[in-house]
Image: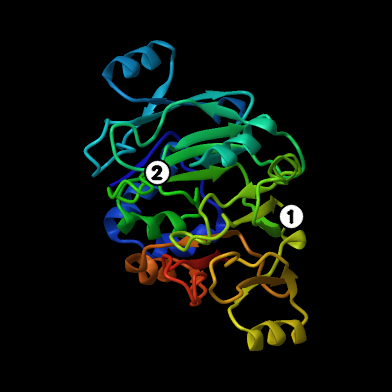
């Protein structure tokens, strides 16, 4: 199921998506539109997040004025029934990140992110997962006005079609349950304006402070080697946006993109695995990029493509025994 909160905001680019939805979804969409068509105000910003691990914690959060988001963040694992909660306020949350190891957490902590100290895999086998958020106000910070959860991968295409931004990490990471993702809706449409990658943690704090968002999934997932992460920054100005991203997985492709005047991200996305060298390339050309992320579930690729997502058909783990991972972009 797809679970969402509060107000729905329609952007012009979403109108095509509305035409493609079923009559049932269109009716629901129009009802939401009729209820609220106003611009976001300070009271509609998402300003605080919390997590409950049991019924007693749920009761405490209700008493503190938090609102619950439907959906179990541990769906399918047999672990605790975990719920996400939010408050509206005048100081917006602008970034949401996930950590699944201590080194990831260190960079977030040093950059001043607020941790939610509740393990999202509590009671289940899997990584220790924690949510973090920032209330930045810089050039690369755009307020979050709505937040949603999907507990079934089949519902992701609809979220992409309506302009939601997916938080990369599966909240059941390594717990063998359903694929659980957090989704964000921002006050204004955003575009990717910068992209980079890291194969160590030493620059994490600096990148967070400069406004970068980490794609919280390792491009070497299951392959050993270094933890490699892709990072990006967002802008509300389409004129500053990147227009195209590509992936090269062999020397011939490296040369091809060089000759086509693409700019290379220097970090090998396969660093330390013994597999092919894999590089990210980008340029400014035609349509601005709105989102970038990783897909590990082959079953949803077709639906996501039909929703307007471009999946680059090159496995980032080519040449090793890791998970099949594909980069996706949304234009």
Residue at 74% of width from left, 55% of height from top? 237
Question: Can residue 39 be spotted in the picture?
Answer: no
Q: Position of residue 251 (x, y in %)?
A: 65, 85
- Left or right side of 239 for 165: left
- Of labels 1 and 2, earlier in sequence is 2
Disc 1 is placed on an element classified as loop
Q: Is residue 280 above or below residue 237?
A: below
Q: Position of residue 266 (x, y in %)?
A: 73, 67
Q: Which mark is residue 295?
A: none
Of 125 and 12, which appears nearest the observer? 125
Kindly check if marks 1 and 2 are in contact, taking CB atoms under 8 A apart as contact.
no
The residue to which callout 2 is attached is 171
Residue at 37% of width from left, 72% of height from top? 302
The residue to which callout 1 is attached is 237
Tell me if mark 2 has few (under 14), some (14-19) or many (20+) residues whose alpha carbon lies within 10 angstroms of its own. Answer: many
Q: Position of residue 58 (x, y in %)?
A: 33, 19
Res. 240 image quadrant: bottom right
Residue at 51% of width from left, 76% of height from top? 314
Residue at 52% of width from left, 74% of height from top? 312
Question: Can residue 151 be spotted in the picture?
Answer: yes
| Image quarter hosting the C terminus | bottom right
Q: Position of residue 195 (x, y in %)?
A: 69, 59
- Left or right side of 301 for 186: right
Of 89 and 154, which appears nearest the observer? 154
Tell me if mark 1 has few (under 14), some (14-19) or many (20+) residues whose alpha carbon lies within 10 angstroms of its own. Answer: few
The mark closer to the camera, 1 or 2, is 2
């Amino acid at each position: 199921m797809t679970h969402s909160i509060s107000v729905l905001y329609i952007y012009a680019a979403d109108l095509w998506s509305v035409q493609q939805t079923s009559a049932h979804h269109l009716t629901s969409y129009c009802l939401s539109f009729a209820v609220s068509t106003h611009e976001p105000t300070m009271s509609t910003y998402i300003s605080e997040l919390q997590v409950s691990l049991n019924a007693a914690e749920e009761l405490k959060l209700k008493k503190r004025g938090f609102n619950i988001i439907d959906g179990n963040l541990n769906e399918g694992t047999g672990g605790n029934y975990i719920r996400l909660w939010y408050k509206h306020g005048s100081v917006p949350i602008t970034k949401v990140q996930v950590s699944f190891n201590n080194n990831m957490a260190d960079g977030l902590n040093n950059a001043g992110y607020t941790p939610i100290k509740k393990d999202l895999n509590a009671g289940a086998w899997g990584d220790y997962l924690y949510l973090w958020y920032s209330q930045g106000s810089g050039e690369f910070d755009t307020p979050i006005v709505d937040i949603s959860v999907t507990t079934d991968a089949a519902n992701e295409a609809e979220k992409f079609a309506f302009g939601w931004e997916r938080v990369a990490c599966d909240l059941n990471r390594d717990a063998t349950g359903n694929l659980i993702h957090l989704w964000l809706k921002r006050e204004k449409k955003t575009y990717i304006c910068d992209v980079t990658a890291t194969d160590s943690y030493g620059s994490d704090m600096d990148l967070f402070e400069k406004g970068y968002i980490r794609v919280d999934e390792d491009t070497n997932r299951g392959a050993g080697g270094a933890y490699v992460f892709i990072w990006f920054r967002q802008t509300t100005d389409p004129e500053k946006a990147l227009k195209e991203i590509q992936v090269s997985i062999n020397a011939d492709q490296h040369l091809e993109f060089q000759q086509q005047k693409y700019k290379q991200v220097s970090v090998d996305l396969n660093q330390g695995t013994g597999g092919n060298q894999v590089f990210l390339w980008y340029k400014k050309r035609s349509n601005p990029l709105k989102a970038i992320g990783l897909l590990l579930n082959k079953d949803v690729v077709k639906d996501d493509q039909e929703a307007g997502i471009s999946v680059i058909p090159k496995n980032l783990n080519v040449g090793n025994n890791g998970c099949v991972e594909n980069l996706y972009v949304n234009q």
